[in-house]
Image (spheres, rainbow, N blue to C red):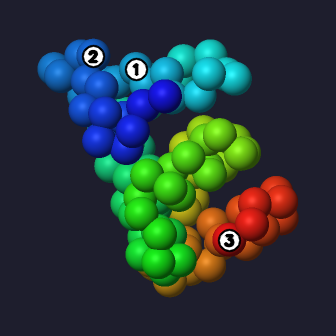
Amino acid sequence: MLCLTQFQNQIVNPSDFSIMASYNPKSESVTMTKEQLDFAVFCVESVADSLNMTGDEVYRLMVDESDILDGYIIQFCDTLHTQGKEYIVRELTEVMRERGISI
């Protein structure tokens, strides 16, 4: 299991900022851009701040207990990225609750 810092530092091809992060043992490896990675880190850390948790704790909830990181944040990155921080945090905490995560 990768911690958040390791996840952020998994750069495979720095010339085009592509990374390969195999952060969920239940799924296959996921390729994402540096911008998607930066946004995912922003989301995890923002939710962590709002819940008075560490980034690592929220990361584990979003990966180990659900598919929110890959199946929601990365999948809908382009849409979420157009919203403000408060909306993103509210949306992600709602998704966490809907998927049965106790927060």
Q: CA distance from mark 1 to mark 3?
A: 29 Å
Q: Earlier in the sequence, mark 3 or mark 2?
A: 2
Q: Earlier in the sequence, mark 2 or mark 1?
A: 2
Q: Looking at the image, do the residues carrying marks 2 and 1 touch, with CB atoms under 8 Å apart? A: yes
Most extreme residue toward the left is 15
Disc 3, SS? loop
Q: Position of 9 compared to 50: left or right?
A: left
**Residue 33: quadrant of the picture:** top left
Q: Earlier in the sequence, mark 1 or mark 3?
A: 1
Asked whether residue 50 is in view, the answer is yes
**Residue 14: quadrant of the picture:** top left
Q: Determine the residue positioned at 42% across, 75% down.
A: 49
Q: CA distance from mark 3 to mark 2?
A: 34 Å
The tag on residue 20 is 1
Say which residue label 3 marks. 103
Q: Amino acid at mark 1?
A: Met
Q: Nearer the viewer, residue 61 or 90?
A: 61
Local crowd size for mark 2, using a 10 Å CA cut-off: few (<14), some (14–19), many (≥20): few
The tag on residue 12 is 2
Disc 2, SS? strand
